[in-house]
Image: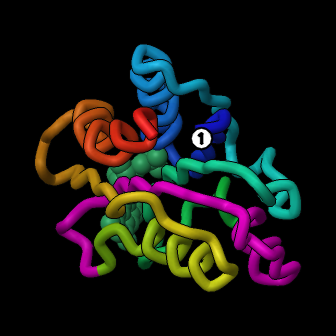
Amino acid sequence: MSKLSILFGTETGNAEMVAEDLAAALAGNGIDTEVSGMEDCAAEDLAGQDVLLIVSTYGEGELPESAAPFFEALEHREPDLSSVRFAAFGLGDSTYDTYNNGIATLVAKFTALGATQIGATGYHDADSGLNPSDVAIDWAGTVFAPVAQA
Ligand SMILES: Cc1cc2nc3c(=O)[nH]c(=O)nc-3n(C[C@H](O)[C@H](O)[C@H](O)COP(=O)(O)O)c2cc1C
């Protein structure tokens, strides 16, 4: 696969930590990545990219603050993402009714704009007590191993 662009949206840093730890783990498996905050990503530059989306959920099921402008750009500019492949990992807390709505919102938007999802969406539940990076690295093994071998 081409270079994987890891985009994170975070409120208190967990998604950024997961993004950095996943980048290190994927590098160890021969997958080259570039990590960016969604606030630094222009929606119209996504065409042709392989993307890994990592976001938490805040408020009442909303995307975190740092992901809001990126999502608004997707909504208003409606870029053609038919050349984009993406994987998705969400961070949430199952004690909320709106468990992991943030990543679900982004997956729905990417799909509506024509992008193709690789593998199933991964989730971290803060209520589980598990380390988010450990959960994400286990999940990535199921999603990216077949891609890396392709
Ligand atoms: C004020 C507040 C609101 C939250 N709202 C939700 C929510 O609606 N749904 C959910 O699944 N998780 C919710 N969470 C849990 C966070 O998504 C979770 O703690 C996550 O690990 C935070 O990641 P971040 O540091 O990258 O933002 C909330 C957490 C806080 C502190």
Report the residue at 69% width, 37% height from top: 36
Can residue 75 be seen at all in this image of the molecule? yes
Q: Position of residue 87 (x, y in %)?
A: 47, 55
Residue 47: quadrant of the picture = bottom right
The count of marks equals 1
Q: Is residue 90 magenta?
A: yes
Locate residue 61 relative to residue 131 in the image: left or right: right
Dividing the image into four equal quarters, which quarter contains ligand 1? Answer: bottom left
Residue 78 vertical placement versus 81 (above, below): below
Viewport quadrant of the N terminus = top right
Magenta span covers which residues? Answer: 69-97
Viewport quadrant of the C terminus = top left
Q: Residue furthest top?
A: 28
Residue 25 vertical placement versus 148 (above, below): above
- Which residue type does callout 1 highlight? Ile
Residue 48 vertical placement versus 8 (above, below): below
Report the residue at 18% width, 68% height from top: 95
Q: Position of residue 128 (x, y in %)?
A: 12, 49
Q: Position of residue 149 (x, y in %)?
A: 41, 34
Locate residue 16 relative to residue 75 in the image: left or right: left
In front: 30, or 34? Answer: 30
Q: Is residue 95 magenta?
A: yes
Residue behind mark 1: 6
Locate residue 74 relative to residue 142 in the image: left or right: right
In front: 131, or 114? Answer: 114
Can residue 10 be seen at all in this image of the molecule? no
